[in-house]
Image (tube, rainbow, N blue to C red):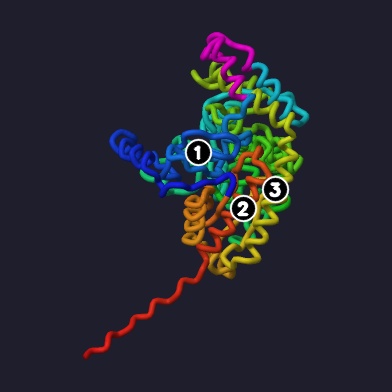
Amino acid sequence: MKHTLIKTELPGPKSRELTERRTTCVASPMDSLAPFYIKHGQGAVIEDVDGNRFLDFTGGWGCLVTGYSPEKVVEAIKTQSESFLHSDFTVIPYEPWIELSEMLAKKAKGKSEKAVAFFNSGAEAVENAVKIARGATKRRSIVVFEGAFHGRTVLTMTMTQRPMPYKYVFGTAPDVHRLPYPNPRKNKYSPKDFERLLLETVCPEDVAAVIIEPIQGEGGFNVPPEGFLEEIRRVTAKYGILMVADEVQSGYGRTGKFFAIENWGIEPDLITLGKSIAAGLPLSAVIGDKKYFDSLPKSSIGSTFGGNPLACAAAIEVIRMIDGDKLLERALNIGKTIRRSFEGFRQKYPSVKDVRGIGAMLAIEFIKDEEIWSPDTETCQKVIQDARDNGVILAGAGLNKNVIRLLLPLVITDEQLAEGLGIIDKAIENATKKQPMKVKVKKMEN
């Protein structure tokens, strides 16, 4: 292997030392996927503190479309840090905020004039989209879907479906309604059922927004069936409801379009962004029709650190990289390579039953029984562990943790991609091997 290297047991001695220190002071719910600790990252490759090298196909949970430590981004951060580290834009404003706003407003295609607001995290962006929708419509109710993931604040956790560990004992927020997500393998709902289900669930005159991920992330990279997003746009327009596209995970070129919603030619009222927006620095955004922002009182939205100048400087370079390095085109090419491999896995391994996604945003699902579509969580988790032990870090997904999703950096090389896919192939082979039966031999008595 050229790009991956495992030279110690995992975790290695230095990682074990850090884990011992961690147990004395780090809050225990802050769990980690990897048992080792990063020392250096470049592009799609990370090196841990013991000198082991891995290909990170999680991209920092989808935050690294432009990879670890892109040179131009690092330089932009250094340059900005020499001028000033922080100024709350609502106290003393600064140019990087305006420049980034101009760039994102231009990226958001459509008929309406766009405005942009910045925050810190994806959950903050979604929560502020709810505030904007409620303020603009003077309504309270929010509609979301099965399989959704929108964040971990109390409100966005309520909007997220999975109870454990996100809802746990933390309680929920009011005025959130969940509708079925059409899935031909799991239910009989069609896109045309959306309006009926909405009317049966909540009074539309009380709905401020319908919020949907154009492609579900944590839910398992579920691609909406034909006509579903178009029907949501039609119905929301009919009842004066805002359509919010949650692009925190699906945005920034992952599907081959800057925003995933562009694949359907739809202009939502608001778009939320996060994760890859600033190459890993904390930054998120809400983009939308300017009239909705203009309807709100001054200072009604904002954040002390939201749109921090260092993060804005990084984010400007991320967009320049996406455009200059043709990363949208790269996402499509990467996607073709991944899909070929994933389809090959589906042919070779009976437990791999589905390949889905758009562009480089692709996933495979492990199923035990195709007739009842029962999840094969055990095999999926074995694959993730085996791949990790051999140099590829993978992210799981799905309500039953039986999906592997790729969130890899779009700057990954063809050689690195081939090596990583080969390791995944071997991991699936190892996880699906039939173990020899253990036969008990009765000892003969003398």
Q: Would you identify the image quadrant in which residue 426 lies? A: bottom right
Q: Nearer the viewer, residue 437 or 261?
A: 437
Where does residue 321 sit, x and y in percent of width and height?
69, 29
Q: Earlier in the sequence, mark 2 or mark 1?
A: 1
Q: Is residue 315 above or below residue 390?
A: above
Residue at 59% x, 15% y: name it. 79
Where does residue 340 sit, x and y in percent of width and height?
70, 56
* Residue 47 image label: 1
Residue annotated with mark 2: 421
Q: Would you identify the image quadrant in which residue 350 lies? A: bottom right
In the displayed structure image, the side of residue 11 where residue 69 appears, left or right: right
Q: Earlier in the sequence, mark 1 or mark 3?
A: 1
Residue, far bottom:
446
- As measured in the structure, the alpha-carbon distance from the residue carrying label 2 to the one carrying label 3 is 12 Å
Q: Nearer the viewer, residue 27 or 300?
A: 27
- Label 1 or label 3, whichever lies nearer to me, is 1
The residue range painted magenta reads: 73-97
Where does residue 371 sit, x and y in percent of width and height?
58, 70
Q: Is residue 99 above or below residue 204?
A: above
Amino acid beneath label 1? Glu
Residue 93 included in the magenta stretch of the image: yes
* Residue 335 image label: 3
Q: Do tag 2 and tag 3 residues touch (Cβ < 8 Å)? A: no
Q: Quadrant of the C terminus?
A: bottom left
In the displayed structure image, the side of residue 418 where residue 147 appears, left or right: left
Amino acid beneath label 3? Gly
Amino acid beneath label 2? Leu
